[in-house]
Amino acid sequence: MDLNHEPTADSYVYGTAIEELAHVVRVCLEQSASAYESIDAVIQCAEMGCTKYPVSWIALDPRIHYFPSFEMALANAMLCVPPAFRIYYAEEGIRFADMVCAVSKHISSDGVFYVYAVVVGLNEVFSHATVGTAVSAARRDREEGEQDLGF
């Protein structure tokens, strides 16, 4: 995958396979897994493919593709982590919730909810946070959006 091409436009993505990867992200956070274990679990899940439909997820450029949940965007970004970073996370014993990520969020085109783009590590354009902090912020976004819709 070439991450050096110039983006022409952002895209918005959703599907069953990415939802399953997002579920793996949520489980890893609930289980207080390490960053290395979490990335490995997402990679293995993507390689196995979706259980409901015979599709698998191929990582998209995390800098320009936006997803309807932070967990989906993070799962996609985890597939783009270079092997050297994965080794670093393992050697340093970094917890998944403490892993640094860069986040961009926009309101959806219909103005109803937020969409997210995430890069694992640092990015000169996106805001930086730990995974744990970013998940909490995304959950607040979702709760505020549901209140705005009268739920």
Image: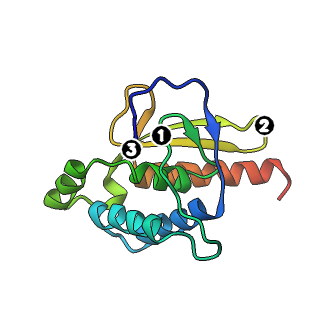
Q: CA distance from mark 1 to mark 3?
A: 15 Å
Q: Which residue is mark 1?
A: 61
For marks 1 and 2 on the same chain, the one whose residue lies earlier in the sequence:
1
Which residue type does callout 1 highlight?
Asp
What is the quadrant of the C terminus in the image?
Answer: bottom right
Image quarter of residue 93: bottom left
Q: Residue furthest left?
A: 91
| Residue sitting nearer the eye, 113 or 52 | 52
- Label annotation for residue 139: none
Q: Residue furthest right?
A: 150
Q: Which residue is mark 3?
A: 101
Label 3: element kind: strand
Q: Badge 3: how crowded within 10 Å, few (<14), some, or many (20+)?
A: many
Q: Name the residue at 32% across, 52% down.
A: 99
Single out the mark in the foreground, 1 or 3: 1
Q: CA distance from mark 1 to mark 2?
A: 24 Å
Residue 19 picture location, percent across and down: 60, 63
Q: Badge 2: how crowded within 10 Å, few (<14), some, or many (20+)?
A: few
Q: Name the residue at 39% across, 74% down.
A: 31
Which residue type does callout 3 highlight?
Cys
Which residue type does callout 2 highlight?
Gly
Label 2: element kind: loop
Single out the mark in the foreground, 1 or 2: 1
Q: Which residue is mark 2?
A: 111
